[in-house]
Image: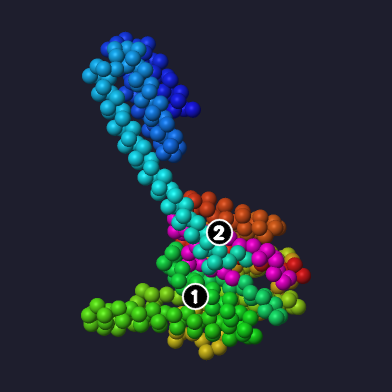
Amino acid sequence: MLSLALIVAITVVDILTPPEIHLGPLLIVAPAITASFAGARATTAVALIALAALTVIGLLRDGIDTANHETQLGAQIAVSALIIALRVLRDRHERELAQVRSVSEAAQRVLLRPLPDRIGPLHLASVYLAAEAEAQVGGDLYAAARTATGTRLLVGDVRGKGLSSLGDAALLLGAFRAAAHLHAELPDLATYLDGSVCWDLAQLGEQNRLRRAVAGAVPDPALDGPATDDAGESFITAVILDIPDDGSVLRLIDCGHPPPLLLHADGITALSARHPAPPLGLGELAPTRYEVEVFPFLPGDRLLIYTDGVIEARDASRRFYPLTERVTAWRADRPAALLNHLRRDLLHHVGGRLDDDAAIVLAERLT
C-alpha cells in the first residue's frame, strides 16, 4: 500500500507541476521500497505499475515519443530489472537459510534430545543458547537416562564453542546414552565416558598423522600428537549425577565443571565437590577411581546445573552474570518459568548475543 500510494502521489504531483519539472524518475522509489520487505513477485508487480504510471505521465504531458521520456522509461526499466534481480537473489538466500535452519533444528533434536518434562520422581526443564549465529546447537550438552534404581543426568561443556565442537558433544552424548543404564556404579560410568572421549581423540590424532604422511610431510610429534594437536587439546568438563528414586540424596561426580546450585527451603547452596576430577578426555590425568560426592536432595528441592557460558557471560562493563543473585529472586517460580526468566535476563545482560554456548538444566524432586 505504501508503494502504491507513492506511485499515485508522484504521478499526480508530476502532472500538476510546470513542464520544466520532471518528477517521474522518482517512481523508481516504489519498487525499491517494495523489494526491502516483499518478495520478487510483489516487486515485479510494483515495478510494472510504476512503468505504467510513467507512461501515463508522458501521455498527459509532452508525449511518450520524446527523447526525455524515452530516456526516463529506459532508465526505469534498467533499474527496475536490477532491483528485481537482487530481490530474486535475496529470496534464494532466504530459502537456503530456511533450509539450513531446518537442518540445524533437526540436528538439535537428534543430537540434543529434549529432556522429558517428567522422568521418575523428577520434573525437568532446560534452556540452550548457542553462540554461533543461526545455530541451534553447539558445544554444550545435556542428557537424562533412566536406570533400574533412579535417574542419571549429564551436563557437559566441550572445549571451544559453536559448530566446531559438535563432534565431541555427539560422542559424549552417545556414550552416555549407551552406557548410563549398564554401569551400576557412577565411577564406572565416568571411567567409561572418559575412555570413550580419549579413544576418539587418539583416533583423530592418528588420522592427522596419516594425512601428513600421505601429503609427504615429515611426521612431527609436536604437531601430530594428541597432546598438542588442536583436536587433541579438546576436553569436556562435565557433571555426572545419579538420583535414586527411593532416597533423599543425589550422587555427583564433578569433572572440572562449575558446581550445581541446590535450591532448597533454606536458600541456595553450591554443591562444590571436595574431590573434583579433571575434565574428560585428558588421558593420563584421569583418576584411577572417581570420587562420588553425596548431597541431600529432598522432595521440593531443585537442582540447577549450568555451563560456564552462563556464569562467564559479561555485560558492556565486563561484569560477569550474577547467576546466584538472579536465581534467588525467582527461586519460588515453577521450573519452566524460572528458566524463562534466566534466559531473558542472561540475554539482556550480554546485550542479546552470547560469546559462548550456554546450557541450563533444572531438576525438581517431586517425591
Q: Is residue 10 magenta?
A: no
Seen in the picture, residue 212 relative to 358 is either above or below; the reply is: below
Q: Is residue 121 magenta?
A: yes
Q: How many marks?
A: 2
| Spot occupied by residue 14 in the image (x, y as percentages of width and height) | 36, 15
Left or right for 229, reference 199: left
Residues marked 1 and 2 touching at CB (< 8 Å): no
Nearer-the-camera pick, 241 or 33: 33
Q: Residues within 10 Å of mark 2 (few under 14, many from 20)?
A: some
Which residue is tagged 2? 322
Q: Which amino acid, by three-letter code, is at mark 1? A: Leu
**Res 335 visible:** yes
Q: Earlier in the sequence, mark 1 or mark 2?
A: 1
| Cα–Cα span, label 1 and label 2 | 32 Å
Q: How is the image coloured?
A: rainbow
x 51%, y 67%: residue: 140
Q: Which residues are magenta?
A: 116-143
Nearer-the-camera pick, 367 or 292: 367
Q: Residues within 10 Å of mark 1 (few under 14, many from 20)?
A: some
x 49%, y 84%: residue: 195
Left or right for 350, reference 218: right
Seen in the picture, residue 194 relative to 29 is either above or below; the reply is: below
Left or right for 104, reference 324: left
Nearer-the-camera pick, 260 or 237: 237
Q: Which amino acid, by three-letter code, is at mark 2? A: Pro
x 24%, y 19%: residue: 68
| Spot occupied by residue 191 in the image (x, y as percentages of width and height) | 54, 85
**Res 310 visible:** no
In the image, which is nearer the foreground, mark 1 or mark 2?
1
Which residue is tagged 1? 171
| Spot occupied by residue 261 in the image (x, y as percentages of width and height) | 62, 67
